[in-house]
Image: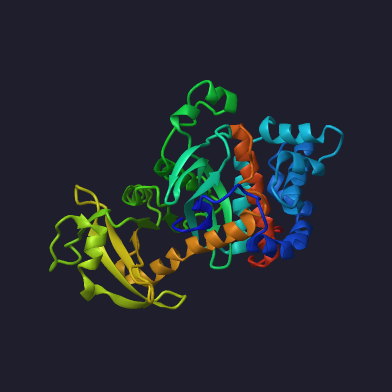
């Protein structure tokens, strides 16, 4: 997500104290207290057996209370009996419970407690020290090549808080072929793909989130083809704002601006060539210089959108480009949506890291999804405890 911390290579998750971790210490007691029986019933009610619901609560409680890196060994202290480490491992990596119903429960609670303004889709780098964790491969970043996993997260976001709801793990060809596929438990329907394809799957998954319908979608993924993502979103009918690079192709929509030429140009060139259309806009966090141009982005001259460009005052050369389904007249509303990835970056650093969202080190594909699902539930509870929610995450109608 641009320069968000989850995309920075950094060290292994859980290493060393951070300012964000110190901030989490202030809310740890209230977050742990918030994980009461009613919250657990609403989050984990889809689990068929009582023993599974108990283990889910114990696991999430461990994510909220254990300091440092959240390993299966450290979390096993929350489980009962002499076989606690084996029980924790089996519950995450081998027990046949489905993670999607819990993600839907997190979405329902987040919708009620956050009053979200949009979905935000962004990429997350999860550094790993070796090649054995599921999905781990060399990842090219702005700071060099880093070994790790690449995931795409779908977040419900308001101006005050962000909660992760759904996740896609990028799999290279070596993880979708035997023997690694079989060893990691990667299902046959899991396809290899790029981060861009993960973004498309994330968008497609929104149609299944009936709990939260009609929200705009903000995509800020540097590794993806933003113009392709915008075209895909346009086909869904969802309102959207997608960050694009300066090389993204676009031409002026002459049905909206008949006095301008419609030569195909890059988005960056187009934005710089129209200084007369720039305006000062109050984006909700102070004024900024911006430009909104009706454009067409497909070779067949379809896909009418708005190219949104923004120049931050006092930051020479700092220009951001977006494609949006919102019209040029809605420039202030579109700019407010572009601020929401910053809320995700902040809450990832302050909460997600603290509850061990990046800490799963196992080789199991189902285990990765179950861990990150329960870490998302822990994030939700912590976000409410911090005060970023408008009400308690329970008590809504079934």
Please give the name of the residue rendered at 27% of the width and 53% of the height, measured from the top-left corner. Answer: 248
In this image, 377 relative to 59: left or right? left
User: Going by the picture, which residue comes out furthest to the top?
Assistant: 179
* 280 relative position to 302: left or right: right
Q: Position of residue 156 (x, y in %)?
A: 54, 57
Q: Where's residue 175, x and y in %?
A: 50, 29
Front residue (pair 25, 330): 25
Display colour scheme: rainbow
The vertical placement of 221 against 321, above or below, is: above
**Is any atom of residue 189 visible in this view?**
no
**Where does the image place residue 370, in percent across and percent down from the top left?**
64, 39
Q: Residue at x 19, y 56 (%)?
A: 265
- Is 276 drawn above or below residue 232 in the view shown? below
> Which residue is depicted at the point 32% across and 66% down?
309
Q: Residue at x 76, y 46 (%)?
A: 57
Q: Quadrant of residue 383?
A: bottom right
């Amino acid at each position: 997500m641009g320069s968000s911390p989850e995309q920075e290579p950094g060290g292994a998750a859980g290493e060393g104290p951070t300012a964000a971790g110190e901030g989490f210490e202030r809310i740890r007691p209230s977050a742990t207290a918030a994980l009461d029986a009613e919250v657990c019933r609403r989050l984990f009610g889809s689990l068929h057996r009582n023993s599974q619901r108990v283990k889910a609560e114990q696991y999430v409680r461990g994510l909220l209370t254990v300091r440092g890196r959240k390993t299966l060994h450290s979390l096993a202290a929350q489980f009962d009996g002499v076989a606690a480490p084996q029980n924790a491992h089996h519950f995450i990596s081998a027990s046949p419970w489905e993670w999607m119903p819990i993600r839907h429960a997190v979405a329902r609670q987040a919708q009620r407690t956050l009053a979200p303004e949009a979905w935000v889709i962004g990429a997350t780098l999860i550094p790993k020290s070796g090649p054995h964790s599921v999905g781990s491969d060399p990842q090219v970043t702005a700071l060099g090549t880093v070994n790790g996993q690449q995931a795409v997260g779908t977040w419900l976001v308001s101006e005050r808080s962000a909660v992760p709801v759904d996740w896609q793990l990028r799999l290279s060809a070596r993880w979708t072929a035997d023997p690694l596929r079989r060893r990691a438990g990667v299902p046959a329907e899991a396809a290899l793909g790029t981060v861009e394809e993960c973004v498309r799957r994330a968008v497609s998954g929104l149609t299944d989130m009936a709990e939260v319908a009609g929200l705009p979608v903000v995509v800020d993924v540097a590794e993806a083809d933003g113009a392709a993502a915008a075209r895909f979103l346009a086909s869904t009918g969802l309102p959207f704002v997608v960050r694009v690079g300066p090389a993204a192709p676009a031409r002026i929509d002459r049905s909206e601006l008949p006095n301008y030429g419609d030569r195909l140009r890059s988005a960056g060139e187009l934005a710089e060539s129209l200084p007369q259309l720039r305006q000062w806009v109050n984006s909700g966090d102070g004024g900024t210089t911006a430009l909104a141009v009706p454009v067409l982005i497909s070779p067949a001259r379809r896909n009418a959108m708005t190219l949104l460009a923004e120049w931050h005052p006092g930051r020479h050369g700092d220009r951001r480009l977006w494609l949006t389904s919102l019209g040029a007249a809605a420039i202030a509303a579109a700019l407010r949506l572009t601020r929401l990835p910053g809320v995700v970056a902040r809450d990832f650093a302050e909460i997600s890291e603290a509850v061990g969202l990046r800490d799963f080190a196992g080789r199991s594909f189902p285990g990765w999804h179950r861990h990150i699902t329960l870490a998302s539930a822990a994030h939700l509870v912590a976000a409410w405890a911090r005060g970023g929610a408008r009400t308690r995450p329970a008590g809504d109608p079934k």
